[in-house]
Image: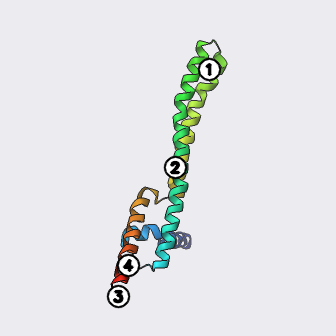
Amino acid sequence: MKDFFLQRLLQRLEKDGNDDLALIMEFGANSYSTQELSNILQQVGDQKEIAGRWQHRLFLVGFSVSFWIATSFIAAACQAQLISFLLLAMVPVSLLLALGGHFYLRRRFPAYRNIHLVASIIQQELDRRKKDASIF
């Protein structure tokens, strides 16, 4: 049992140690080479694009709640009770999808909340290195 907990702790430490974005947030970008920073900046851009698309989709799913409610009222006004009930049942489905998608997004891209800050830290370090290189 003791070995299991030690193994889990080591896996967690290894995972945290391999998270470049978290390390840059905590310690800065000084210890990375310029090539590594360029690659990380490219990865950050890709993650921002993918996460942004998912955010947009989740917004549309959440916004569809108002559509389901409105069409349900229209169906009820037209005496289509079954259709009205089915459309109204889509409200919690849409909300659960949006909420589940939000948690999935946070789990898949844990640094997404701070991704703009990480990108600016990396860009500032690259600009500083470019400026230092032009002095010599």
Mark toward the viewer: 2 or 3: 3
Q: In the image, what residue occupies the spot 42% across and 71% down?
A: 23
Q: Can you give x and y, in whole percent of width and height, for residue 32 in the image?
A: 44, 78
Q: Which residue is mark 1?
A: 84
Q: Secondary structure at mark 1?
A: helix
What amino acid is at disc 4? Arg
At label 1, the amino acid type is: Ser
Residue at the image point whose x is 44% and y is 60% from the top: 115
- Label 1 or label 4, whichever lies nearer to me, is 4
Quote the CA–CA distance across marks 4 and 3.
11 Å
Nearest to the observer: residue 131 or residue 40: 131
Q: Which residue is found at the position 48% from the left and 68% from the top? A: 41
SS category of the residue bearing label 4? helix
In this rendered view, identify the residue nearer to me: 9 or 91. Answer: 91
- Quarter the N terminus occupies: bottom right
* Gap in angstroms between the C-alphas marked 1 and 4: 63 Å
Q: Earlier in the sequence, mark 1 or mark 2?
A: 1
Left or right: where 116 falls relative to 92: left
Residue indicated by mark 4: 129
- Circle nearer the N terminus (4, 3): 4
Task: Between residue 126 and residue 30, name the one nearer to us.
Answer: 126
Q: On the image, numbered disc 2 is attached to which residue?
A: 103
Image marks 1 and 3: residues in contact by CB distance under 8 Å: no
Q: Residue 3: x and y, percent? A: 55, 73
Q: Which amino acid does the dot numbered 3 rest on? A: Phe
- Left/right placement of residue 28 relative to residue 4 reads left
Q: Earlier in the sequence, mark 2 or mark 4?
A: 2
The residue that disc 3 covers is: 136
Task: Give the position of the C terminus as an image quadrant.
Answer: bottom left
- Crowdedness near tag 4: few (<14), some (14–19) or many (≥20) residues, C-alpha within 10 Å: few
Q: What SS does tag 3 mark?
A: loop
